[in-house]
Amino acid sequence: MGKIKLDGPDVYSVTPISNRFIDEFMLNANGEFVKIYLYLLRALAAPDYDVSICHIADIFNHTEKDVIRALKYWEQTGLLCLSMDDSDRLTNIHINEIESIRTDSTAPQERRSLMQDSPQTSAKNGLKSKNVAPAANSAESAGREQITPIPADIPPKHSYSANELDSFKEKTDVIEFLYLAQKYIGKPLSGSDTNTLLYLYDGLGFEAELIEYLIEYCVSNGHKSLRYMEKTALSWAEEGIDTVEKAKANTTLYNKSCYPVLKAFGLNGRNPGENEKALIIKWTNSYGFTMDIILDACNRTMKQIHQPSFEYADSILTKWKERGIRTMGDIQSLDEEHQKNKTLHPGRQYYSAKQPAPAASGTEGNGNLSKPASKNSFNNFTQRNYNYETLEKELLGNI
């Protein structure tokens, strides 16, 4: 997803937060959602802030789906207004004046009910559950914890009572993955850690073997946080990954294809978003490109526009596919052809990866390039909206 336009009330060198937000909205919201809302308020006072789903996910170590859930939650409260383009991509976030929003004492619970289902509804949707007999106070505990909006077919998280914990302790497979988690993390599990692991087993319906593989996978990639493991598990649940075999297939794709691309773009410490993963699969499976060709397109993207862009890299790879590029030698021949054309036609401009096209200015926020930049304006260029097709043609010399 590209950069998103953000607008709202005028602000200055401080980030004002309404007392009403603290008193009425913050108390019933997930803490991670609060962070994202505060980030948006801060971004209003700094035009150079990168307001994009990808960037926000990087900052808070979330997945892009986590960020979208947060934005939709705040839209349900009335604090935000989200605008989409014809392709259903988020293009504008408007922060509403909080004083104009009407609420009542039951609004927070009503808003949560719009975005999540009860465990009983989830069971009807086909998710298996290993629920033990609930304690008398479990409903009250669930009411406090079931704040994070999650997909409708996934049971919400709640705090397990002492009686429930005792019941789980009688299960050998539970004791085994709790012990494994403690060994991998390198410290005793806290009550919150144990609750999270039991949620994966009881709420998401993960078998003990799958939980053990999840723990090993996350720790081997440098993530010992139970919060990170929970986010990964939720992502797997959404994608229908419910066995170790499916998980291994998914992680193999990440290790062999996704990780090198993210690294080339400098996007460390997160998994690819759904759209990003779809593009990588297209490049490898549909186009049949080897990783060295894909990484070359990523490197050209960074050299040309100085920021990661899956869409820009896709435009390069699509053109190479159309031209029958199959090897790095084919790419080198294409670059040499551009260089030869420049020599034969000095009055005509050709651009290759070794000589990127100059930046352009004059955009009006819709991504279209209206006029080329003057020779002396490059260093002052700050606009980051790009017409990928036009820039890609310039890169390949087809102008």
Image (cartoon, grey):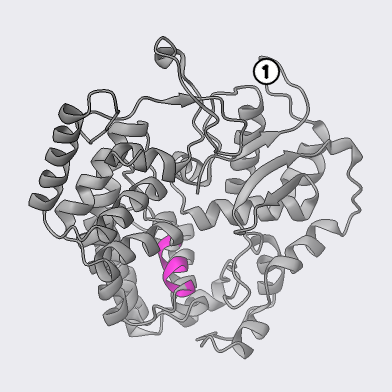
Instruction: Please determine whether, in this image, residue 29 is positioned above or below residue 7.
Output: below
**First to last magenta residue range:** 231-238
Q: Position of residue 398 (x, y in %)?
A: 32, 42
| Residue at left offset 67%, top offset 31% | 41
Q: Quadrant of residue 97?
A: top right
Task: Give 291 or 185, whichever is nearer the viewer.
Answer: 291
- Name which residue lies at 60% across and 42% down: 36
**Residue 300 x %, y %:** 26, 39
Residue 261: say if magenta.
Answer: no
Residue found at the far left of this picture: 329
How many callouts does the rendering have?
1
Q: Is residue 346 visible?
A: yes
Vertical position of residue 67 compared to residue 394: above or below: below
Q: Tell whether 292 sits left or right of 52.
A: left
Q: Secondary structure at mark 1?
A: loop
Main SS of residues in magenta: helix
Crowding at dot 1, Cα within 10 Å, few <14 / some 14-19 / many 20+, comes out as few
Look at the image and say whether residue 235 sits in the magenta stretch.
yes
- 322 horizontally vs 375: left or right: left
Point 67% across, 84% down: residue: 121
The residue identified by callout 1 is 14
Residue 4, x across and y down, in percent:
59, 40
Q: Nearer the viewer, residue 291 or 208?
A: 291
Q: Give me the residue at 62% from left, 81% from top.
A: 134
**Whole-percent x, y for residue 242 in the image:** 39, 81
